[in-house]
């Protein structure tokens, strides 16, 4: 069963935006939280992803691999020498970090993910793609750390 049957394969931006809308609907139904996403680059870079302090990340293979790929750095081109903090390491208004796919959603406090990343010294991976730095958080640990978890098929 395809997780995104209505999306064009390979269109990562459209998939991510569709997932943000999906997560917004789940959070509103389950927690009564209405998300208002920023849509301009200047707002997203200067403030954050949403007015309410939520950042949403699509992780298509997480339920198959048994791990979440948590972003900590990025660069615009592979040939640049340095990464810029992003994801959980970015300094913005984000309090909540939501990650998953259309099967399972985890809602974390960003501060908790940062703490665990530093405390447990997870190795940073930056080779696939070479413009993103991430670490892998096992789903078993995500289950313990998450403030909220949703089996979407049951929502």
Image (tube, helix red, strand yellow):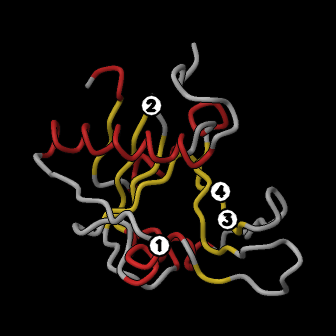
Whichever of labels 1 and 3 marks the residue nearer the N terminus, that label is 1
Whichever of labels 1 and 2 marks the residue nearer the N terminus, that label is 1
Residue 131, position as x, y percentages in the image:
76, 68
Question: In this orientation, which residue lies closer to the viewer: 131 or 140?
Answer: 131
Residue 8, position as x, y percentages in the image:
62, 29
Residue 35, position as x, y percentages in the image:
22, 55
Q: Residues within 10 Å of mark 2 (few under 14, many from 20)?
A: some
Q: Residues within 10 Å of mark 3 (few under 14, many from 20)?
A: many
Q: Is residue 96 above or below residue 90?
A: above
Q: Which numbered mark, 1 or 4, is in the foreground of this view?
A: 1
Residue marked by disc 2: 102
Distance of label 1 from label 2 (alpha carbons) = 26 Å
Whichever of labels 4 and 2 marks the residue nearer the N terminus, that label is 2
Discs 1, 2 touching: Cβ within 8 Å: no
Residue marked by disc 1: 41
Distance of label 4 from label 2 (alpha carbons) = 19 Å
Name the residue at 59% across, 82% down: 85
Distance of label 1 from label 4 (alpha carbons) = 27 Å
Whichever of labels 1 and 4 marks the residue nearer the N terminus, that label is 1
In the image as oriented, which residue stretches furthest toward the top?
1
Quarter of image, res 31 = top left
Whichever of labels 2 and 3 marks the residue nearer the N terminus, that label is 2
Q: Is residue 70 above or below residue 76?
A: above
Discs 4, 3 touching: Cβ within 8 Å: yes
Q: Which mark is residue 117?
A: none
Q: Which numbered mark, 1 or 2, is in the foreground of this view?
A: 1
Q: Is residue 88 left or right of residue 130?
A: left
Q: Which numbered mark, 4 or 3, is in the foreground of this view?
A: 3
Q: Which numbered mark, 1 or 3, is in the foreground of this view?
A: 1
Residue marked by disc 3: 134
Q: Which mark is residue 136?
A: 4
Describe the element under mark 4 as helix, strand or loop: strand
């Amino acid at each position: 069963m395809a997780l995104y049957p209505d999306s064009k394969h390979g269109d990562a931006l459209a998939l991510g935006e569709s997932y943000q809308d999906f997560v917004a609907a789940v959070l509103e139904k389950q927690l009564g939280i209405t998300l208002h996403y920023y849509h301009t680059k200047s707002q997203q870079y200067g403030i954050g992803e949403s007015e309410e302090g939520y950042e949403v990340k699509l992780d298509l293979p997480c339920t198959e691999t048994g791990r979440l790929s948590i972003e900590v750095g990025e660069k615009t081109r592979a040939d640049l020498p340095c990464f810029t903090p992003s994801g959980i390491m970015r300094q913005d208004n984000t309090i909540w970090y939501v990650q998953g796919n259309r099967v399972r959603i985890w809602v974390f406090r960003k501060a908790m993910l940062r703490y665990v990343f530093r405390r447990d010294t997870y190795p940073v991976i930056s080779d696939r793609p070479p413009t993103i730095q991430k670490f892998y958080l096992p789903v078993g640990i995500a289950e313990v750390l998450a403030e909220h978890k949703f089996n979407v098929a049951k929502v």
